[in-house]
Amino acid sequence: MLAITATVASAQRVMTYDDLAAMKRIGSAKVSPDGKWIAYDLTTTDLPNNKRTTAIWLMRADGSGAKQIVDGSGATWSPDGKTIAFTTGGQIALYDVAA
C-alpha cells in the first residue's frame, strides 16, 4: 500500500502559471427570458503573444449545442429574448439571436 501511495504522490506536479493561463475562463452567464438558452463569455489566453480574447458563446439550457456567436463580452438579453447586447471594441453592439 505504501508503494502505491508513493507512486501516486510522485506522479503529481505543482500547477504552474502557464497551466493557469492556459485555462479557459467562463463569466457573465445569462439565461434567456424563456429559460431555453444561456449566453456567456469565454476568455482564452495566448500566452506567447501576451493576449486575451473574449467571445460570447450561446448554448441550450441543457448544456448542449454550445457555439461561439461573436467576439465581445458582457452579454445581456433583451426582454423579449430575441437580441443579445454586448460590448466589443469599447462599443455596445447587438446580436440577433434569431438570425
Image: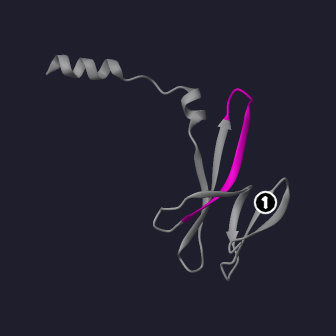
In the picture, the quarter occupied by the C terminus is bottom right
Q: Is residue 54 left or right of residue 26?
A: right
- The residue at the far front in this view is 99
Q: How is the image coloured?
A: one colour
Residue type, mark 1 in image: Thr
User: Where 46 falls versus 75 (above or below)?
Assistant: above
User: Where 90 falls versus 6 (above or below)?
Assistant: below
Q: Is residue 90 left or right of residue 60?
A: right
Question: Along the line of sight, which residue is nearer the eye, 87 or 70?
Answer: 70
Residue located at (54% from left, 30% from top): 19
Is 57 in the magenta?
Answer: yes
Where residue 37 sits: x, y (%)?
A: 56, 70
Is 56 in the magenta?
Answer: yes
The secondary element bearing badge 1 is classed as strand
Assess disc 1: are there few (<14), some (14-19) or many (≥20) residues with their C-alpha within 10 Å of its C-alpha. some
- The residue at the far bottom in this view is 80
Residue located at (58% from left, 34% from top): 22
Where residue 23 sits: x, y (%)?
A: 56, 39
Q: Quadrant of residue 11?
A: top left
Residue located at (13% from left, 22% from top): 1
Tally of numbered tags: 1
Where residue 72 sits: x, y (%)?
A: 74, 55
Q: Quadrant of residue 48?
A: top right
Range of magenta residues? 46-59
Disc 1: which residue = 87
Main SS of the magenta part reads: strand
Q: Quadrant of residue 34?
A: bottom right
Question: Along the line of sight, which residue is nearer the eye, 69 or 50?
Answer: 69
